């Protein structure tokens, strides 16, 4: 196993640590990106509130496995004002990809579909407002791009959930088959022991009968 495979396996066995690393990475990259993004006349200058919103969009990743729906809406609650206030958004939207992916991956399909559609619809509404507003420079093709990006994130999460459910079903089937095999093996052993005991009983009984007959015959001969 290579070092990369060992690292990936370690992350799978330690999901909390993996999410913490993800939060730190995205937060650092987002802050770096917005500070080094090319200046735009329509963008607001970064201030303390922008950094609060960036942190608020990243921290809910820590609870995305346990509370995917709540985490996604909290992320959107911080991301939406960041977009509306027109701060530089080079990498901030990445957290919403993770949020929608987690909704598709960690809850049942009817609920994940409802929340996924609602989340994506909210993003499209905010994006459409940005396209329509004369003070914004958001191009019209950003709307279908948002739909494709965030829709793909949900589909990938849903596929992961489906594969996990399929694997759990296979594991349950294999465990049931193994239990049945062990039960059949135990029953076969018990049947074999019963057969051997019966044969031994018959042999011993026959031998005892022969001994009794021979003892009776010997007594008569001696007389």
Image (spheres, grey):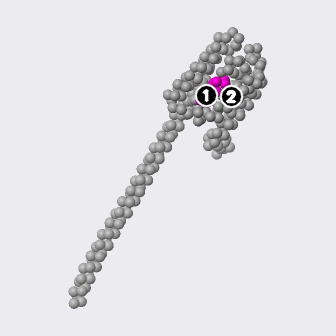
Q: Is residue 182 magenta?
A: no
Whether residue 5 is visible to the viewer of this picture, yes or no, is: no
Residue 208: quadrant of the picture = bottom left
Horizontally, is 62 left or right of 159 in the view? right
First of labels 1, 2 by sequence position: 2
**Magenta part of the chain:** 70-79
Q: Residue at x 38, y 56 (%)?
A: 187
SS type, badge 1: helix
Residues packed near mark 2 inside 10 Å, few (<14), some (14 to 19) or many (20 plus): some
* Quarter of the image with the N terminus in it: top right
Residue 131: quadrant of the picture = top right
Q: Nearer the viewer, residue 163 or 16?
A: 16
As drawn, 152 above or below 172: above
Q: Which residue is mark 2?
A: 56
Horizontally, is 220 left or right of 37 in the view? left
SS type, badge 2: helix
Residue 178 image point, x, y percent = 45, 49
Measure how far apart labels 1 and 2 are at the Cα level.
Answer: 11 Å
As drawn, 1 above or below 160: below
Q: Nearer the viewer, residue 125 or 47?
A: 47
């Amino acid at each position: 196993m290579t070092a990369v495979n060992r690292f990936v396996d370690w992350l799978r066995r330690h999901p909390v640590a993996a999410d913490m690393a993800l939060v730190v990475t995205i937060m650092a990259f987002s802050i770096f990106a917005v500070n080094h993004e090319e200046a735009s006349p329509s963008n607001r200058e970064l201030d303390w509130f922008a950094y609060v919103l960036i942190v608020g969009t990243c921290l809910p990743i820590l609870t995305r496995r346990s509370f995917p729906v709540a985490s996604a809406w909290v992320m959107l609650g911080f991301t939406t004002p960041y977009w509306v206030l027109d701060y530089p958004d080079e990498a901030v939207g990445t957290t919403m990809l993770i949020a929608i992916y987690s909704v598709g991956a960690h809850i049942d399909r009817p609920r994940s579909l409802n929340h996924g559609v609602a989340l994506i619809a909210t993003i499209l509404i905010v994006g459409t407002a940005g396209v329509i507003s004369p003070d914004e420079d958001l191009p019209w093709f950003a709307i279908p791009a948002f739909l494709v990006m965030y829709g793909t994130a949900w589909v990938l999460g849903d596929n992961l959930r489906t594969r996990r459910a399929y694997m759990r079903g296979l594991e349950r089937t294999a465990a049931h088959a193994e239990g049945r095999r062990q039960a059949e093996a135990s029953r076969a052993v018990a049947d074999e022991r019963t057969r051997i005991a019966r044969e031994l009983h018959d042999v011993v009984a026959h031998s005892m009968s022969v001994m009794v007959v021979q003892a009776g015959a010997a007594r008569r001969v001696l007389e």
